[in-house]
Image (spheres, rainbow, N blue to C red):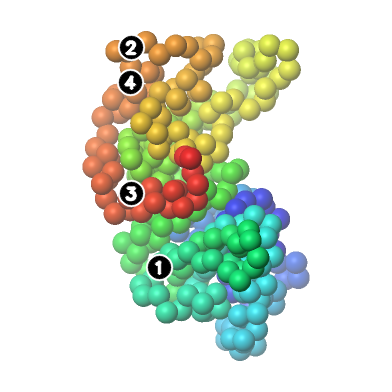
Amino acid sequence: MSLVDGTVLFVGESPPPGAPAGFRPFDCASGTRLARNMLGLVDRETLLEHVPLANLFDQPTGPKGTPAWPVDAARDHADALLAIHARSGVRSFVLLGSRVAAAFGMAHLPGPSSLAAQQLWPDAAPPRGPDVVLVRVPHPSGASTAMNAPEVVRDVRRLLLPELVLGCPALRPWHFRLDDPAVAEDLAVAVAPLRPSAGYAALEWANSKHKARLASPPGSLLARIANEAAKGCDGADLVIPPWDESLARVAADLLLPDGVERLSVRWDEGGGPKPTVRGRKSWLASRIDGLALSIDALAPSPIARATVLRYALGGLGR
């Protein structure tokens, strides 16, 4: 069971055959495919460190040479996972593969991937049980043929990225393969479905600042200057710069009509918030124009509209 904090849980089947005792869910080749292909993360370790993960069974179950898949026990385990994690704050469950989907009651939905909302404990006395979102996608196993088609991989990633934005508060732009244009575009739409160019510019800016931070050793003159500049009025060190924040916080701003200006003020490196000058563009708006991107054509696309609706369901931007 994963100990990573978050409001999303990725659920797989079981450890692979031959997995050692104490196996961490998805610390295997399937985890690498889940991280890099389906989510666009830089590597498996990033997945294990920042994304909540679980399996229905703790022992290898289902593949050849292991015990047969027990349908009834899988349903019982799914019910237990759903109850335990929903009560602890998890609001979306990503179900990896048809067996896991069937255990959660999603076997009847068409297509390789789908999303549904479910009311938990509807007969409970008020207040009613919470709504949770169930997302069904193909299993990242190499034996799964569904993920052989590049267009399916892209569709799955676009479906899953909003779940990461909402449910994984520790993820940052530099945890993703932004050097891959498709990943960068998909994450930009996930962060700013109404104006993807703003999402792209914000991601690119934060990523560049992170690289600069890594290039300055902690004891260097540049690092000391940056640390002094980041001190609060009481002299206390503010070790986290404003651009090092959750993707959900960025997305919440960029869902608003004045979101670019809001983000420009919060990330301003010129000494803090300043009154907006009428007719003058913010530094972030100017940066967006300078990039001259064409991805805003994706704003009216079905995936962008679905992302906006997903965030409304998740309460983002309220």
Q: Position of residue 178 (x, y in %)?
A: 43, 42
As helix, strand or loop, the secondary structure at mark 4 comes to helix
Q: What residue type is labelled 4?
A: Ser
Q: Which mark is residue 278?
A: 2
Answer whether labels 4 and 1 touch (C-beta < 8 Å): no
- Secondary element at tag 2: loop
Quadrant showing the N terminus: bottom right
Question: Element type at marker 1?
Answer: loop
**Which dot marks residue 304?**
3
Specify few, some or many for label 3: CA neighbours under 10 Å numbering under 14, 14-19, or 20 or more: many
Q: Which of marks 1 and 2 is nearer the N terminus?
A: 1
**Counting residues from the N terminus, which is met first, the one under dot 2 or under dot 4?**
2
Q: Please give the residue where the numbered disc 1 appears in the rendered image.
A: 113
User: Measuring 69% from the left and 65% from the top, which residue is drawn there?
Assistant: 84
Q: Identify the mark at residue 286; answer none if there is no mark.
A: 4
Residue at 52% of width from left, 36% of height from top?
249
- Return the residue nearer the eye: 292 or 21: 292
State how far apart marks 3 and 1 are (Cα): 17 Å
Q: Which residue is at the far front?
A: 126
Q: Is residue 65 among what the camera can see?
A: no
> Disc 3 or 4, which lies upstream in sequence?
4
Distance from label 2 to label 4 (Cα)?
15 Å
Foreground tag (3 vs 1)? 3
Q: Earlier in the sequence, mark 2 or mark 3?
A: 2
Spatial CA span between label 1 and label 2: 46 Å
